[in-house]
Image (tube, rainbow, N blue to C red):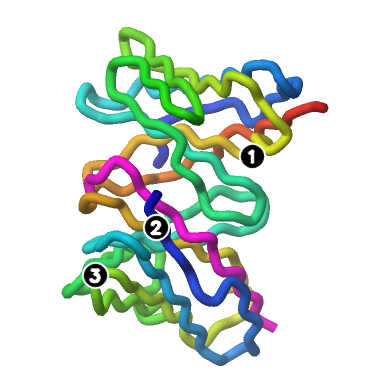
Amino acid sequence: GAVVSQHPSRVICKSGTSVKIECRSLDFQATTMFWYRQFPKQSLMLMATSNEGSKATYEQGVEKDKFLINHASLTLSTLTVTSAHPEDSSFYICSAPKGGASGHEQYFGPGTRLTVT
Amino acid sequence: DAKTTQPPSMDCAEGRAANLPCNHSTISGNEYVYWYRQIHSQGPQYIIHGLKNNETNEMASLIITEDRKSSTLILPHATLRDTAVYYCLSRDRDDKIIFGKGTRLHILP
């Protein structure tokens, strides 16, 4: 089946630094990808929609200047957490629908656990 | 906001069928119902989806009521590896999947 990968799987960084997380669709092209954040014992919260060749659209309350999204190709979207702080520590998960934004099967990456010290 | 409601947790004995209910009384007539599950510290995994008819695949069966106000996901022979949080979802008008709180399914040995 379709696979979505994320890199890195875990990252620890110091407060004030920036961290880049990659999301790749391995065997299909994805013009749209989604980024989620999940805090412990909570559900996934949608952060933004990544659009290939255009600007990302952010959910209400998500700072676009803090969470930079670049969808440079049909198989790669990146999320950069800028000037990270301990409250940004979370599990970040991307997803990509196969067959376009309305494709029925949406595939999720394995997640990236970010710890900011 | 999520348009579905689920019980927060359920138990099921290993080897028995796990029946997970979901209420979605506010979804529109052309909105699909999707089920995903999340095993601890992993990304969600697609299980099944349906519109009106009952559906079955290698993982599960989905039973949708005739009025489409609720559905049940059936795992026919639950194993310990089915322990996970199960999410019943629909999509918003922008095709985004919005997660609710899901049902934490415990499989008991």
Left or right: B68 in relation to B16: left
Quadrant placement of the C terminus of chain A: bottom right
What's the chain of the residue with tag 3? A
**Residue B27's x, y, as percent?**
30, 26
Distance from the alpha carbon under mark 3 to that under mark 1: 31 Å
**Residue A43's x, y, as percent?**
55, 48
Tag 3: amino acid? Leu
Tag 2 residue:
A95
Do the residues bearing badges 1 and 2 touch, measured as CB atoms within 8 Å? Answer: no
Tag 3 residue:
A74
Do the residues bearing badges 3 and 2 touch, measured as CB atoms within 8 Å? Answer: no
Tag 1 residue:
B84
Distance from the alpha carbon under mark 1 to that under mark 2: 19 Å
Q: In what element is the residue under mark 1? A: strand
User: Residue B78's image quarter?
Assistant: top right
Decide: is B82 above or below B18. below
Decide: is B60 above or below B68. below
Distance from the alpha carbon under mark 3 to that under mark 2: 13 Å
Q: Do labels 3 and 1 share a chain?
A: no
Which residues fall within the magenta stretch?
A: A102-117
Viewer-side residue, B8 vs A50: A50
